[in-house]
Amino acid sequence: MNSPGETSAPVSANARAAPWLSVLIPVYNVSAYVEACLNSVQSQVEGAGELEILVLDDASSDDSWVKVEQVARDRPQRLRLLRHANNRGVAAARNTLLAQARGRYVWFLDADDVLLPGAIAGLRAQVEADAPDLVLCDFRVLEHGLRWHHRLRANSKRRTYEGDDRRASTDRSALLSGLLQARQLHVWSKIAKREAWTRVRFPHGRCFEDVAAVPALVAGVGRWRHVPCAWVGYRRRADSIMATMTPAKVRDLLAALRDLRDGLTTLAEGFDENARTALDYFCLRTLAYVARSLPRDDASLDAECRAVSADVLSQSPRQVLVACFRRGWWLRAWRAQRSLARRGWLR
């Protein structure tokens, strides 16, 4: 049954069978990309076992929904369509999709991205081999336009985890440290059992909701592994959230940093010195990014950033930088130091 304000397309009898995987795709004003996204998933369902693809339109004002319906008519296999009657934001869309998902594993995918060939088969192989609670995958950055390129540049592949990925693990500290060092906390590179995802409640009305969700997800994970394969094609867009920062988005990012810090420090296990150092590193580099993006004439927001810096870092920014230099992160630390110094945020 749908929540109030939502509608759903009919589901075939085959789609109602218990699936091993739910692919969850929130849609909002992505007309230029949504067909490529859906086709990249649909092209992999043959022989992939029982899975479902849930697509939720968050009251798009363009023709995204028209294109979703067209794909559903042409390739209805495994599709379940949902709609919000009113635009409620990506966090609410993710929460609705989670409530509707029936798969043993849940994989979020943004509607302007794609699943790369072999992604679902690769995930299924890991599930059948280890049955981990969480699988981390890598990704590639898509070129401008609707297709991804196969002429791989040296920096086209992005890791989502830094550390030993030769085997599955139950070491939560290693999981946290590896995630925070890689600084890729987006949800679409983290495929987890539905029981782990149901602990997560994305904060409504805020950007960077995926950063805030990480502690709850990690708390529900026992056995996990990183697969050093690119399964997602990430589209870097000129109008993305990160590319078009505003004071409101900066405040959302600051709130996400606080949520991340608060959530991780209350974990029953796994938040040791290594994880604490990695959290400092993540927060410092995020604050350096904010320092580069912040309007110069917003004294109030500048003061908020300074306050958050004091809250989320276990030491002063200068001390965290020293720790980064000692670990050999020279270039990263130097860039962060330069950005923070220009703002006068070093002390």
Image (cartoon, helix red, strand yellow):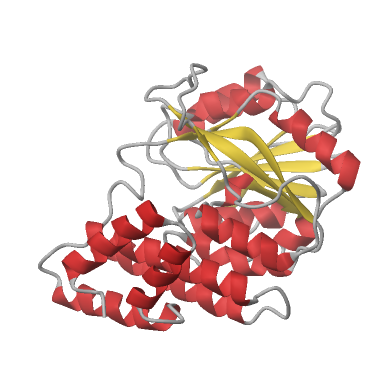
Residue 321 in which image quadrant: bottom left
Q: Report if residue 201 is visible in the image.
A: no
Q: Nearer the viewer, residue 151 or 35?
A: 151
Q: Nearer the viewer, residue 266 or 40?
A: 266
Q: How many marks?
A: 0
Q: Is residue 105 left or right of residue 187?
A: right
What's the residue at 71%, 70% (across, down)?
219
Residue 48 in which image quadrant: top right
Indicate the position of residue 7 as horizontal and vertical percent values: 61, 46
Q: Is residue 202 left or right of residue 87?
A: right
Q: Nearer the viewer, residue 131 or 62?
A: 131
Indicate the position of residue 98 as horizontal and vertical percent values: 67, 55
Up-down relation of residue 227 to residue 14 (above or below): below
Up-down relation of residue 97 to residue 286 (above or below): above
What's the residue at 32%, 60% (across, down)?
336
Quarter of the picture holding the N terminus: bottom right
Indicate the position of residue 338 as horizontal and vertical percent values: 24, 60
Q: Report if residue 308 is visible in the image.
A: yes
Residue 199 in which image quadrant: bottom right
What's the residue at 72%, 36% (across, down)?
10
Quarter of the picture holding the C terminus: bottom left
What's the residue at 75%, 61% (across, down)?
196
